Image (tube, rainbow, N blue to C red):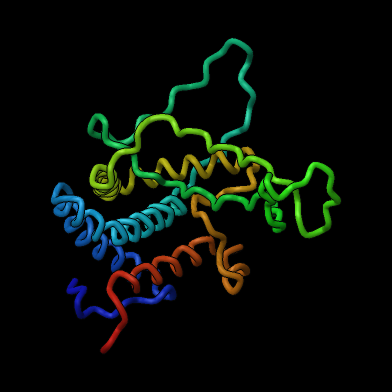
Amino acid sequence: MNLAHAPLPTPAEPDRLEAFAHDLLGHLVRALLQLAGQGRDRARQAFDMLVLAELMLRRLIYLAALRIDLPVPVATRPSPGTRPPAATPGAARMPGLPRFQLVEPLPREAGPARDPRPLLDPADCPRITVMDAHARPWMQEPAPAALPGVRPDLETRYLFRAQALAGAFANLNDEAARLARWIARRKAKESDRQSPLALPPEPEDLDRARTDPAWPVLVDIHLIAEHMVGPDTS
């Protein structure tokens, strides 16, 4: 497929859109791998496209997982003293290579609203005072807890994620089976979250998503592909 001149299929053409996205991602994965190890500047320039490629692959894997019909496991509580069964082996991976992240982290819930009143410096607080509704006494802000370990540098993170992306793309069917098992377990537990994607469908897609869960995924793929190939100027 000549991606430079091929029109971008719409979500109403699921087979063509999925094939287009797969071909586009194949070209992109090779290019991203070639940039690995080329220095920090190259990694920084390519990181945004790497994130888009991860979003695209995750949705292609999700589409494939939706086509896998697994029985929903019965949620049982293990007897005391018994070990849980070992995880089903997946596709062989290189030792030390991080596994591709199939499930997107949910957006952090908003914490309690921050008090909008200004903090008063101790020098501005007399020993006896009447505090009005627009000020509050000064209190020392708690120091943030130190994070354990050392975070890898940007170039190393890029290398690991590009390798994980390429590995998952090469074993897409195995990754789909792994995700299908995750979905089945969530259904068995009647979990509130049964989608690996972080954000719910757009409001205009909610009704259709209830009967066709692949539809909002196709909409996402179309939007991501638009960002990758740029606007259609034909």
Q: Position of residue 90 (x, y in %)?
A: 34, 34
Relative image position of residue 97 (x, y in whole percent): 27, 35
Horizontal side, residue 220 vs residue 225: left or right: right
Spot the residue most to the top. 81
Q: Nearer the viewer, residue 44 or 64?
A: 44
- Name above or below for residue 31 compared with residue 172: below
Q: Provide residue 62's location: percent of width, then percent of height.
A: 43, 53
The answer to which of 194 and 151 lies nearer the viewer is 151
**Where is 37 relative to 203, above or below?**
above
Q: Residue at x 68, y 56 (%)?
A: 118
Instruction: Classify residue 98 as left or right of residue 215.
Output: left
Count of numbered marks: 0
Q: Image check: 129 left or right of 12?
A: right
Indicate the quadrant where residue 191 lies.
Answer: top right
Q: Who's the residue at 20% across and 51% down the image? A: 40
Foreground pick, 222 / 148: 148
Q: Residue at x 24, y 64 (%)?
A: 23
**Residue at horizontal 68%, vertical 42%?**
139
Quadrant of the image occupied by residue 9: bottom left
Residue 84: percent from the left, percent from the top? 52, 20
Q: In which quadrant is the N terminus drawn?
A: bottom left
Q: Is residue 86 left or right of residue 15?
A: right
State which quarter of the image contains the C terminus: bottom left
